[in-house]
Image (cartoon, grey):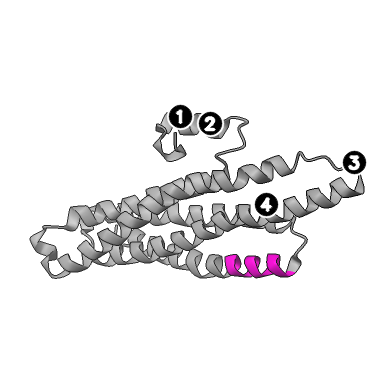
Amino acid sequence: MAMYKKTCEEFVEVLASNAPVPGGGGASALVGAIGMALGNMVGSLTVGKKKYADVQEDIIALKAKADALQKEFLTLIDRDAEMFEPLSRAYGLPKNTEEEKAEKERIMEAALKDACSVPVEIMERVCEAIDLLEEFAAKGTAIAISDVGVGVACCRAALLGASLNVFINTKSMKDRAYAEEINEKAEKMIAEYTVKADTIYADVRGRF
């Protein structure tokens, strides 16, 4: 069964166990999906309201994008697990001889890059979600504006959470040029989108 198809109780139980997956990356993807869904809910509550007739087309378009992102976040839960498992196995490879050491290093390097790829993608999707939440905050119904704030708080956490799964993998890479390129990409997203998320949250909070 796909991770995202488990019940909330099942997911939390396996997350708390000693199973290698899901871990922080999958958890971050789930939190991102929840954050996006909260913004989408505000859109759902706005559609059909006469007071917001002038933004109906915008809201419908936003909801379509949010629907797609929600689904993508859920698939990323399982993709993160799929990419991490080879790395988990690689840590246990023998290194008794020089040949075994070289083979383990080769396999580890490839596995680290694969394991790093999904958290980077989670971060990219979270940035898209925060952009959508900004629009939901500006155009969505005021009666549910707090949910945009909760959604953006979730997405901020998902962004930072996924970044840690990037940095822990790049730290172990032998290819330092590649690692620094990925680190720079992640740092740029953090710098821009934590500020944007904080601004949206402050705007929402200021309306109460």
Magenta segment boundaries in residue numbering: 177-187
Res. 192 in view: yes
In the rendered image, the quadrant that contains the N terminus is top left
On the image, the x and y values in percent for residue 160 come to 55, 56
Left or right side of 135 for 92: right
As shown in the figure, which amino acid type bears the numbered disc 1? Glu
Q: Residue at x 60, y 32 (%)?
A: 19
Q: Specify whether 145 is left or right of 91.
A: left
Residue lying at 91% horizontally and 49% vertically, measured from the top left: 98
User: Could you tell me how far apart the alpha carbons at marks 1 and 2 are, in whole angstroms?
Assistant: 6 Å
Q: Give the distance between the C-alpha atoms of the residues marked 4 and 2, in whole angstroms.
A: 23 Å
Q: Residues within 10 Å of mark 3 (few under 14, many from 20)?
A: few
Q: Check disc 2: other Cα within 10 Å, few if <14, some if 14-19, many if 20+.
A: some
Crowding at dot 4, Cα within 10 Å, few <14 / some 14-19 / many 20+, comes out as many
Say what secondary structure mark 1 lies in: helix
Q: CA distance from mark 3 to mark 4?
A: 20 Å
Q: Which residue is labeled 2 in the image?
A: 14
> Helix, strand, or loop for circle 3?
loop
Where does label 3 land, which residue? 96
- Main SS of residues in magenta: helix
Residue in the foreground of this view, choosing between 114 and 154: 114
Q: Residue at x 86, y 43 (%)?
A: 95
Mark 3 vs 4: CB contact within 8 A:
no
* Residue 97: x %, y % from top left: 91, 44
**Disc 1 to disc 4, how far (Cα)?**
28 Å
Residue 88 image point, x, y percent: 68, 41
Q: Which residue is mark 4?
A: 111
